[in-house]
Amino acid sequence: MSKRYKIAVIKGDGIGPEIIDEALKVVDAVAVNSDFELSYEEYLMGGNAYDITGDPLPEETIEGCRNADAILFGAIGGPKWDDLPRDKRPESGLLRLRSTLGLYANYRPVKVYNELVEASTLKSEVVKGVDLLVMRELTGGIYFGEPRANEEDRAYNTMLYTKAEVERIAHEAFKAAMKRKRRVCSVDKANVLEVSQFWRDTVIEVAKEYPDVVLEHMYIDNAAMQLVRDPKQFDVILTGNIFGDILSDEASMISGSIGLLPSASIGGEVGLYEPIHGSAPDIAGQGIANPIATISSASMMLRFAFGEEEAADKIDRAIEMVLRDGYRTKDISAYGAKEVCSTQEMGSIIAEIVSRA
Ligand code: NAD
């Protein structure tokens, strides 16, 4: 009997539905010649969920995600919901989903496609060949630490990490490095912050279990600089929540387009796979969004959540092939386009290549 995987699909707002439809087209195509079957259940989250239910993360969505083998998510948010109270805003739905499901490890791979080196704002010799992974701790650190307060004449937050929190994300980074170039760069601010010294000491302890991986440490200010000076020096960058938030956005720009980069948030009950970009309300409904980040996120889902390496490889190769053949959505059309295609056309071309592979 063939394997069956249940996917909770959250299309979200703005371009979310457009890009998710293309990712589903591609995973359906890859499933045809495989020994697994996929089933989908759609759930609401974000602004559209608020409009219908009054809650950006309805209980039904949480339950549906818990009962799935993986979550494939588009994007949420938009100006329509910007003035709502914080807990009703679309973004609060996503934050709540991540913490409810305990998704503590955020993988953000950054790979520069040879055909698109010119798309980066950095010099092509600096970015050509970049292939790194930012491993960000997602459910701890200063974003969640207590106490926190905004008082009349002062405000404060607490950057707090427990040993268990650092250990589990460090293991995640070392395991990822074992499948890559076997290098981990742990980023902290140990020259100033006690919590960072604790982070560093704990990472050194965990590293003893991975003798084949080379560990180095870098202060966050230096890392931010090194990332644009010579990004090729990095393999896996391991870091906490706030530093990872900043570094992963910086790293994403090395590739030139936000429409290309996938992400995975894992470690809890069920993994969440999503493009790194937002709902792009400025281009929603025009059929010009780049679906590659979402298709690539679906590939990560097949690899991480289901262990379907071959299917994921097929998708990754198909993406490389369409770019090599000069197919471009509007956002990257200035770089080597032989044919400018719509969101739907890009999805169909990738799906077709995958089904022939
Ligand atoms: P954004 O990522 O949505 O858009 C930034 C720019 O990149 C825009 O010009 C947009 O057109 C372009 N862009 C983004 N994705 C693209 C794609 N796939 N193809 C082509 N171009 C693309 O960021 P923003 O404008 O700051 O935010 C818009 C909304 O998205 C806000 O409500 C924000 O809160 C939300 N947001 C959601 C997520 C998420 O759902 N994970 C992440 C970031 C922002």
Image: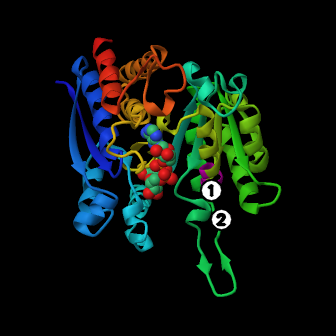
User: In the image, residue 302 lies at what x, y percent?
Assistant: 36, 31
User: Which image quarter: residue 84?
Assistant: bottom left
Q: In the visual, does 125 lie left or right of 11?
A: right
User: Which image quarter: residue 271?
Assistant: top left
Give the number of the mark in front: 1 or 2. 1
Q: Residue at x 58, y 39 (%)?
A: 252
User: In the image, residue 263 lies at what x, y percent?
Assistant: 47, 40
Q: Taking 224 as reference, is 337 above or below it? A: above
Residue at which label 2 appears: 159
SS class, disc 1: helix
Q: Residue at x 59, y 45 (%)?
A: 249
Q: In the visual, does 255 lie left or right of 95?
A: right
User: Which image quarter: residue 53?
Assistant: bottom left
Q: Farthest residue in the right direction?
A: 191
Residue at which label 1 appears: 242
User: In the image, residue 70 lies at what x, y percent?
Assistant: 33, 42
For label 1, the crowd category at 10 Å Cα-Cα, with few meaning under 14, some 14 to 19 and many 20 or more, is some
Q: Residue at x 77, y 42 (%)?
A: 225
Contact? badges 1 and 2 (CB < 8 Å): yes
Residue closest to the eye, 294 or 123:
123
Q: In the visual, does 327 lie left or right of 31?
A: right
What range is drawn magenta here? 241-245
User: In the image, residue 330 lies at what x, y percent?
Assistant: 44, 32
Q: Earlier in the sequence, mark 1 or mark 2?
A: 2
Residue 174 in view: yes
Q: Is residue 4 magenta?
A: no
SS class, disc 2: loop
Q: Residue at x 55, y 65 (%)?
A: 144
Looking at mark 2, is its residue's CB closer than 8 Å to ligand 1? no
**Quarter of the image with the C terminus in it:** top left
